[in-house]
Image: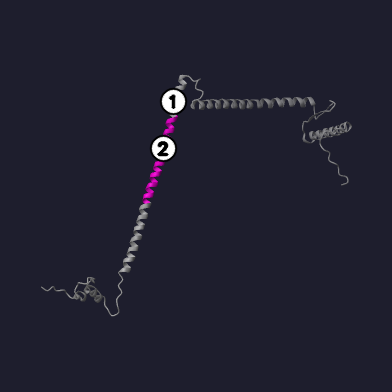
Amino acid sequence: MAGKRERIAIRRIDNLPARQVTFSKRRRGLFKKAEELSILCDAEVGLVVFSATGKLFNFASSSMKQIIDRYDSHSKTLQRSEEPSQLAEDSTCSRLREELAEASLKLRQMRGEELQRLSVQQLQELEKSLESGLGSVLKTKSQKVLDEINGLERKRIQLIEENSRLKEQLQVSRMARMEMHLGADSEVVYEEGQSSESVTNASYLRPPVDNDDSSDTSLRLGLPLFNSK
């Protein structure tokens, strides 16, 4: 596209004359921007540039010495304000490291390690601490076991109640089936022209059938049997 400026890659210019020309142009532009910043924003600006050959170029909106003195004073103030926080941070880190080392040593000693440096009194204190800790462990363990036993007992009672309920349901079901069968067997079918009383009398008058061939024929007819002497 015509008239469009080519973008220059930001890297060191190898050609010495071209580098010097670029330095001169950019330095003037940088100083111009610093002057504009100081005028537009009422800022105190100090700019120092050393060329590749060591030549000094500077710009100051007022006095370079005043700007440098103000910078030094401000830097010292910041350094003094940061020192206490840094010291406090270092002190906290050191204290935490010491506490961690002490806790690690106590843990190893409770495991039975590194006991040679302990005196008799320290060993007795360690023994008391272990006994106290063991008592707490046993107490907690007993409570856990008791809770589990109570839970199992509650489950056992629930199972017993559920079993009883199922047995009752089974008994009721069996009774209902028996009543249904008895109701079906008690139905009587009467012949046409017969009353229930006649059917009942006939059932009472009819003797049981005897399969013995030696019995008298009168027994089969329903007559009384007389023994002749």
Three-letter amino acid code at the position of disc 2? Gln
Residue placed farthest to the front in the image?
A: 214
Is residue 8 shown left or right of residue 76? Answer: right
Which colour scheme appears in the figure?
Answer: one colour
- Which of these two is toward me, 74 or 196? 196
Task: Please name the predominant secondary structure of the magenta segment in the image.
Answer: helix
Q: Name the residue under label 2.
A: 143
- The first of marks 1 and 2 along the sequence is 1
**Residue 217: x percent and y percent?**
20, 75
Q: Is mark 1 on a helix, strand or loop?
A: helix
Does 100 appear above or below 148?
above
Tag 1 and tag 2, C-beta contact below 8 Å: no
Q: Magenta residues? A: 133-161
Q: Tell me which corner region of the image, top left, top right, bottom left or bottom right, holds residue 74.
A: top right
The answer for how far apart the CA atoms under marks 1 and 2 are is: 23 Å
Residue 77 is left or right of residue 4, and the answer is left
Count up the numbered dots: 2
Please state, as top left, top right, bottom left or bottom right, where the C terminus lies in the image: bottom left
Return the residue at label 1. Answer: 128
